[in-house]
Amino acid sequence: MTTLHAAAQQADVDTLRRLLDEGADVNGKDDNGFTPLQRAATAGSEIEDHQRVVDAIELLIASGANLDDTIPGGRTALYLAIEFSQTVHPVQALLDAGASLEFEGRLDEYLIENANCDETQQLLMKLTGRPAPIVLPDPPSARLRKKDWAKAQVVLDQLFERLNTLGIVAEQKCGTTQEDAWSDCAEIFQERKDRGEQLTGICFYTEQDQKRAVRYAQLNLGIWGADEGGYRETVAVGNQVKEAAESLDLPVHWNGQSEYRPMLLLNRFRE
């Protein structure tokens, strides 16, 4: 870590100003791939004086720090501030400077959950329109016998046929793992899209999911919303799946958020 990075990590504004005046590279990266701004964004985890942290962030930005630089894994200074800061103020300072709230994949999915303080979580909920993470109690579990699963399979066939007619690529026992299933479903999705079908997303369960369902009478589903798996699109697909399942008297255990897999409760098929 360079002297500039260390000063940023400590939100030492006087040292930062001196080093920058001496020509230190405001966008230089340390051995871990962090810029000084990204180091300053993490300072709020240990430094209680949030104004010091804000002052350090604002000085670095005024000196030309790049807001969009990412560390390995895709985190920007803003994302690091969201994760580490004990207050909302460093997060707000970065947003005020124009930092983007657009993130990819799981960084986006877990944005609200990853907030380190309630104020930050509330701000992110307001800006994104997303609800607070909901933690559901564990549903009851029970083992299904072969004949129980056979009865469940009849209704599952009806559900997945219905989902396909709704424009969802719905596949049962699709591959061994989720990675297999995503690959297979993506291929089917593209084939159907190329034929001109209007598709809203993907729903599947894997061989592993089926084995777990037999043991616990709980069937986890994978969902994805077209075209890029965004939060709102994936939630919309989840709601379609939930509505279709409940119309077939299949209870669904799901908190309505994209990062959680809907779970079909199959207890009623036990004799």
Image (cartoon, helix red, strand yellow):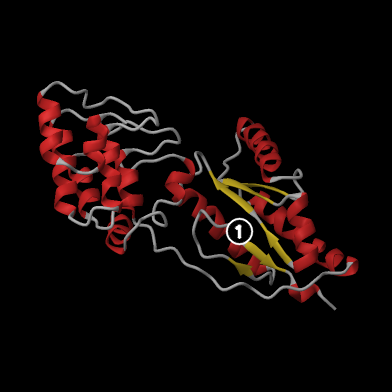
* Residue 130 visible, this orientation: yes
Q: Secondary structure at mark 1?
A: helix
- The residue lying toward the viewer, choosing from 85 and 106, is 85
Q: Identify the image quadrant of the C terminus.
A: bottom right
Residue in the picture at 40% in, 51% down: 111
Q: Image quarter for residue 186? A: top right
| View extreme (top): residue | 23
Q: Is residue 81 left or right of residue 201?
A: left
Number of numbered discs on residues:
1
Q: Which residue is mark 1?
A: 241
Locate residue 30, reporting x and y percent: 34, 28
Q: Is residue 5 left or right of residue 211?
A: left
Q: Is residue 198 left or right of residue 61?
A: right
Q: Image quarter for residue 25? A: top left
Q: In the image, what residue type sits under mark 1? A: Val
* Vertical relation: 65 (above or below) 111: above
Locate residue 152, reporting x and y percent: 80, 66
- The residue lying toward the viewer, choosing from 62 and 173, is 62
| View extreme (bottom): residue | 271
